[in-house]
Each structure stands twice: as C-alpha cells, then as structure tokens.
Image (tube, rainbow, N blue to C red):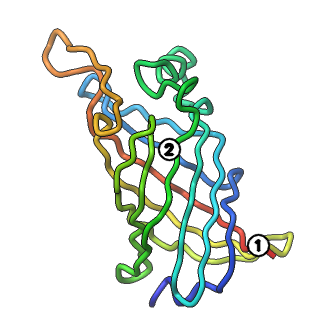
Amino acid sequence: MSVLTSLPAGTFTIDPSHSRVGFSVRHAMVAKVRGSFNEYTGTGTVDNGVASLNIEINVASIDTRSADRDAHLQSPDFFDAATFPKITFASTSIKDAGSEKVVVEGNLTIRDVTKAIAIEFEYSGTATDPYGNARFGFEGAAEINRKDFGLTWNAALETGGVVVSENVKLEFEISAIATK
C-alpha cells in the first residue's frame, strides 16, 4: 500500500501532547541517555501524493530527567540555546518506501548548521478521536553525527573512550491531526 496516496489531501498539525520528539546517545560508552524536547510545532501537507513536513523545536525545552545535564546541554558547550534557540527540519522530498513506510529527506538545522538527512517513518494508522479529529500516526528515526552540527564538547574517560558518543539517534513518534 502506498502511504502517500492513502492519506487525504490537506494540512496536518503535529499534536505535541500525543507525540514525542526525542533522541538517545551513548554515555560513558556503556549506557544510553534518552531525552526529548517538550516544546515543538510541526505541520505537514499532502496533495495528490506529494507531501511536505516542517518541524520547529524549542531547544530550551530539552528534558533528559536531569536538571544539571539539561542546563549543560543548553549551554555553549552543546546547543547554546541563548544564541541558537531553535532546531528546525524542513523536508525536501517524501517518498514511499515499501509497505507502510515513507522516507522523508530534508534539511536539519542545529546551531545554524544545516545538513541533509533522511528519516524513515513507519505509518502506524489512522483513527478518529473522541472529538471527531482525524489522526494519523507515524514513528521514525534517523542517526546523525552531532559533530557535523558543531556539537563537539566531550571528555576522555580514564578507562578509554569518551563521555558522549558522536552518534545520536533522533526519534519521532507523531500523532498528526488533519486541519479542518
């Protein structure tokens, strides 16, 4: 089934109260730290099988369940949220990628550095919620190298390795509402 041709034409808004934009990264080379951004907006459009997606993330809303770590991530060592308050993603193409999947290619901007990435999303279905809204679900992920975006801070460990891995997995769990 083609996901793009099965979606109705129109505009879709990401519902942040039923979605998640997050990440995971290796810490001390032995465990993963997971986090998310609690404030973001996103819209998508579909028209005759052609689609687009735009997301804007508030960097200061980062949440890793550690206030000290969150403050460090907002500092100039990492995101420098005071100077670069937003992370953005703007699609350049969306293509069907087999059974219930789409690949969204686009430009990710972090700290005013823009790089092309591809995110594979799996379509998880459609439902009408109790308020009559048509909802569409997608889950996706992509891996980036944080150094490509100027996120270079690190510290060596006595046992070898570093505190923070260069590779970061971006995670998206999206519930989008069709705009009426």
Of the two numbered discs 2 and 1 on the same chain, state the one appearing first in sequence: 2
Dot 2 amino acid type:
Gly
Which amino acid type corresponds to the residue marked 1 in the rendered image? Thr
Residue 158 in picture, x, y percent from top left: 17, 9
Q: How many marks?
A: 2
Q: Find the residue positioned furthest to the left.
A: 160
Q: Which residue was labeled with disc 1?
A: 179
User: Percent position (x, y) of residue 170?
Assistant: 41, 48
- Which residue in the rendered view is the most extreme toward the top? 158
Residue sitting farthest toward the right: 131
Q: Nearer the viewer, residue 34 or 61?
A: 61
Q: Quadrant of residue 145?
A: top left
Q: Position of residue 79 (x, y in %)?
A: 46, 28
Q: Quadrant of the N terminus?
A: bottom left
Closer-to-camera residue (148/129): 148
Q: Which mark is residue 22?
A: 2
Query: Measuring 63% from the left and 57% from the top, which residue is drawn there?
Result: 42
**Which of the 4 quarters of the picture holds residue 60?**
top right
Quadrant in the picture for the C terminus: bottom right
Q: Residue at x 39, y 65 (%)?
A: 105
For mark 1, give the secondary structure: loop
Residue at the image point whose x is 32% and y is 50% from the top: 143
Query: Which mark is drawn over residue 85?
Result: none
Other residues around mark 2 within 10 Å, as few (<14) / some (14–19) / many (≥20): some
**Along the viewing direction, whichever of 112 and 89 lies nearer the viewer:** 112
Q: Residue at x 26, y 34 (%)?
A: 166
